[in-house]
Amino acid sequence: MSVDVATVKRVARLARLAVTEDEAQKMMGELNGILGFVEQLAEVNVDGVEPMTSVTPMVMKKRADVVNDGNIPETIVANAPLTDNNFFQVPKVVE
């Protein structure tokens, strides 16, 4: 797969980037180099290789997924100018 100048300009426009003709030419070369490297990686045989989350084997720490108030609701709203029963009160913004 290769990228042409028109594709570079289209992607730049979608990203809301202003690119000159020279910059587009330079980006085309850089993007083609990146895509070439990705194609090389796609050729690597990874059959039988398990996905890794770390370079050292370890078990991820997990916590119980429970709903609670954090046991500090008073501390959370302590600096708020207006509160009601540990809820923030804000001025009405929609009529």
Image: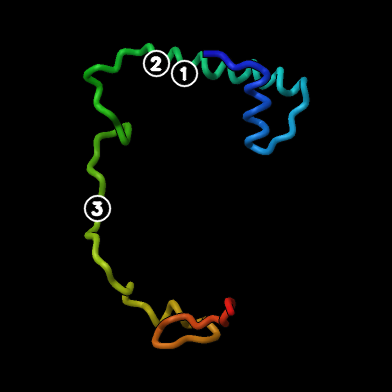
- Discs 3/2, front: 2
Q: Are marks 1 and 2 in contact (CB under 8 Å)?
A: yes
Classify 32 as above or below 53: above
Task: Judge by depth and name the residue closer to the eye, 92 or 20.
Answer: 92
Task: Judge by depth and name the residue closer to the eye, 43 or 76.
Answer: 43
Q: Are marks 1 and 3 in contact (CB under 8 Å)?
A: no
Residue to which mark 2 is pinned: 42
Q: Is residue 91 left or right of residue 57?
A: right
Q: Residue 23, located in which quarter of the rendered image?
A: top right
- Helix, strand or loop for disc 1: helix
Residue to which mark 3 is pinned: 62
Classify 78 as above or below 66: below
Q: Amino acid at mark 2?
A: Ala
Q: Amino acid at mark 3?
A: Lys
Badge 3 crowding class, 10 Å Cα cut-off, few under 14, some 14 to 19, many 20 or more, is: few
Badge 1 crowding class, 10 Å Cα cut-off, few under 14, some 14 to 19, many 20 or more, is: few
Taking the spot 27% from the left edge, 68% from the top edge, the residue there is 67
> What percent of the width, then of the height, locates residue 57?
24, 35
Q: Quadrant of the C terminus?
A: bottom right
Report the disc number at residue 38. 1
> What percent of the width, then of the height, locates residue 51?
28, 29
Q: CA distance from mark 1 to mark 3?
A: 34 Å
Q: Is residue 79 left or right of residue 46?
A: right
> What percent of the width, then of the height, locates residue 27?
66, 22
Answer with mark 1 or mark 3, whichever residue precedes in sequence: 1
Q: CA distance from mark 1 to mark 2?
A: 6 Å
Task: Judge by depth and name the residue closer to the eye, 71 or 93.
Answer: 93
Classify 2 as above or below 51: above
